[in-house]
Amino acid sequence: MQELQAGKLKSIYVVLGTVDYLADQLKQRFLQLIPTEEQTMNVGSYDMETTPVAVALDDAMSAPFFGERRLVFINHPYFLTGENKKSKVDHDLEALQKYFENPEPATILVLMAPYEKLDARKKLVKTLKKQATVAEINQVSERETQDYVQAALQKQKITMEPAAFQELMSRTDGQLGLIMAQLPKLMIYAAQSQRIDLAAVDALVTKSLTQNVFDLVNDVLRYQTQAAVELYHELVTAQEAPLKINAILLGQFRVLLQVKILERAGYSQGSLASTLKVHPYRVKLAMQTVRQFNQTALRAAYLGLLQTEVQMKTTQRDPELLFELFMVQFVNERRTTKVR
């Protein structure tokens, strides 16, 4: 973004990664390169899932219309990845290869690739990487997230209490886009005091389903049957599908088990996040959780929830009753283990 602002422009860019907020920020910065009055004629955007790449190339190879440069976005270029995506759209990849080798000087071509990585084995990708500037935006650490938040708050001369930031991280699963979407209303709240406190986050930021399920995980692992059943009932009453709740629970316990096993094998927080392909903040929370519980309990909970999912899919029994039965069995298994 600094290079674009300084006017250090290249012919081809790749915005690679899954952090939508940063991708949107970069896209807006590219658009600022074209004067507003010229954007209708000199900006093109094409989705490769519905439009042939040849259409985008025709635009890219056209001369700017009463302006210095043309800007063309190629969105979802799935043919640069390793996925075998079935598509009815016929793409002329040879023409794209030729364009990469000899791009139009007056055009800025931006490939918006919301994927974790491209297929480096492909000739097209090899050529692209030689010719293009690649901005990778796959994962944002807690420290980087805090930097983005502080930068936004400093513009308004507002501060945030550390406890408030941690609660905001918790309620948004550490997702930068969700956090930045919550900031405007928090800043309005702090217009007079110029400070965002824990009470503000508690009152204004709703817990996500994942965060509610994380609370449910803690209730399960602490064998707090009544609290777990009540929270499960609240989620169902809020129109959350029981199968979805159970699937997220299973996913949470799967990550906890993996973290428990791999941490014993010497994996660090960073290597765990990259190995498991899980957000670093979620790994941090998992590491804090697994230190309080043994692997036997984690395994028992995971297998019990797996059985509950099977029953939800194969029987007509009430999902809330099935969850209650899971909790009873989980608690009884603990007692049996202690007796042994």
Image: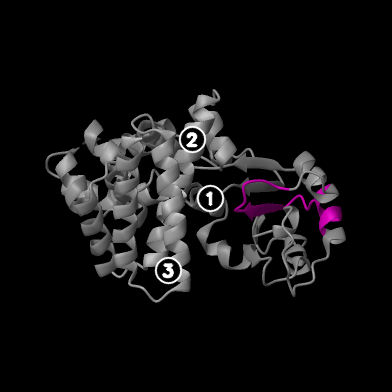
Q: Is residue 60 magenta?
A: no
- Who comes first in sequence, dot 1 or dot 3? 1
Residue at image mark 1: 23
In the foreground, 337 or 188: 337
Q: Residue furthest front?
A: 340
| Residue 301 visible to the viewer | yes
Residue at image mark 3: 312
Q: How many marks?
A: 3
- Who comes first in sequence, dot 1 or dot 2? 1
In the foreground, 307 or 212: 307
At 44% from the left and 48% from the top, the residue drawn is 302
Q: Name the amino acid, label 1.
A: Ala
**For residue 75, side relative to residue 23 (left or right):** right
Q: Name the amino acid, label 2.
A: Val
| Residue 252 visible to the viewer | no
Q: Name the amino acid, label 3.
A: Met
Is the C-beta separation of discs 3 and 2 under 8 Å? no
Residue 284: name its quadrant: top left
Badge number at residue 259: 2
Q: Is residue 110 magenta?
A: yes
Q: Nearer the viewer, mark 1 or mark 3?
A: 3
Where does the magenta region start and end? 96-118
Q: Around disc 2, counting alpha carbons within 10 Å, would you say few (fewer than 14), some (14 to 19), or many (20 or more)?
A: many
